[in-house]
Amino acid sequence: MKKFIFKSVLFITIIATIFTVILLQVDGYTDPFYIRFTTPQKDNLILGTSRSAQSLQPKIFDSILHKEFFNYSFTIAYSPFGPTYLNSIKKKLNPQAKNGIYIITVDPWSISDENPNDSTKFEENNLTLAYVNSVNVYPNFEYLLKEYEGRYYKLLKGKYYHRLRKSGGKMFLHNDGWLEVTIPMDSLSVAKRLNNSIESYRTNKLPNRKFSSLRLNYLKQTITFLKSHGKVYIVRLPVAPEMLEIEQELMPDFNEIINTVIPISNGYLDMTSENHLYQFIDGNHIWKESGKLTSEKIAKWIETKR
C-alpha cells in the first residue's frame, strides 16, 4: 500500500512538474492568442480580425491618446462580427469602464459568411472564443486544456510560430495584444506571398461568401454595447489594390452598407484610398513598419474628433 501511495504521489509530482515547465514555456512566441486571455479586463479596446491584430499597435495609441489600449483582435475565422465575438468582448471589457475609446475595424469579410444568416452554422461557434469562458486570468488553465485538448507538446513546439517560420518569419504576441510578425520583405518574397494570398481568397473565399445582414446586426449591437462605456470609432484598414478588387467583387455596396452603421458610431475612417502609401506582408496584412504609420494616423484622427 505504501509503495502504491509513493508511486502515486511521485507520478502526480512528475506530471505537475512537467505541466509547470510547459507553462513557463508559454509566451508570446508560442501562440498567437494565449496572452490575450491572460490579462485583466480592459477599458480601451482595438477590435477586428487579423488585419487589426497585426497592424494596430496599442503603444502608439497610448502615446497619442493618453489611454492604455489593448488589441483584442483575432482572425477572420475567429472574430468576425457575431454572437461569439460580442460575448467575448463583453467579458474582456471592464464593466466599470467610462469614457473609453473603442476602435472597430471593418471589411467585407467580417460581415459575410458561407451561411450568411444562420448563426448556428457560423464557423467561430466551434473555435476558441466560443469555448474559452475565462479571458482575464493567468495562467489560463481553461485555455490550455481546451485549446490544445491535452496535446501540450504543441505548446513547446509552438505550432503557429513554426508554421510561419517555414516562410522565414516569426510571430510574437505582445502583452498589449499586438501580434508582431517579422518576415522577409524583399520584393520576391512579398510578391510570392501576395500571389498566394490573392489566389487563395479568389479561389476559396470569394465564391463561397455572401453578405450577412445578421453579422451586420451584430456589428451594430457591438457598437451599441461599447457606446455605453465610451466612444466608438470605425476604421477600414488599407489593403493591397489586388485585395481591394476582390473585396469590391464580394461586396460592391460595402460603403452603402457601412453608411447604415456610421450614425450610431462616433466616426468612420476609410483608409483604402491610401493603399499606395503602405507596405503589405501579403496584400492583406500591413507590414509592421507601415502599421506604425497606420496606427499614428488613426490615433491622430480620433484625437481631432474627441
Image: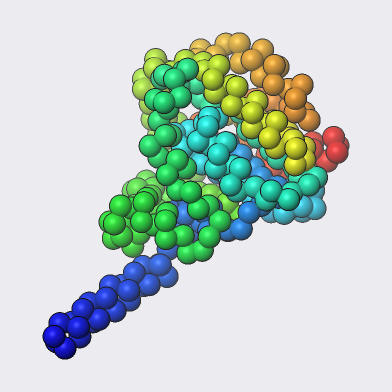
Measured along the vertical axis of the image, is residue 165 above or below residue 76?
below
Measured along the vertical axis of the image, is residue 37 above or below residue 210?
below
In the rendered image, is residue 112 in sight?
A: yes
Q: Nearer the viewer, residue 165 or 1?
A: 1
Q: Position of residue 85 (x, y in %)?
A: 53, 37
- In the rendered structure, the answer to whether residue 291 lies left or right of residue 128 reads right
In the rendered image, is residue 182 in sight?
A: no
Q: Position of residue 60 (x, y in %)?
A: 71, 50
Name the residue located 59 percent from the left edge and 21 percent from the top edge.
216
Q: Quadrant of the N terminus?
A: bottom left
Q: How is the image coloured?
A: rainbow
Name the residue located 32 percent from the left edge and 74 percent from the top edge.
16
- In the rendered structure, the answer to whether residue 169 lies left or right of residue 10 reads right
Q: Position of residue 111 (x, y in %)?
A: 54, 23
Name the residue located 20 percent from the left edge and 85 percent from the top edge.
6
Q: Quadrant of the C terminus?
A: top right
Measured along the vertical axis of the image, is residue 200 above or below residue 225?
above
- In the rendered structure, the answer to whether residue 77 lies left or right of residue 45 reads left
- In the rendered structure, the answer to whether residue 305 lies left or right of residue 90 reads right
Q: Report which quarter residue 103 is drawn in.
A: top right
Name the residue located 38 percent from the left edge and 72 percent from the top edge.
20
Q: Position of residue 141 (x, y in %)?
A: 42, 60
Question: How many numbered markers are drawn?
Answer: 0
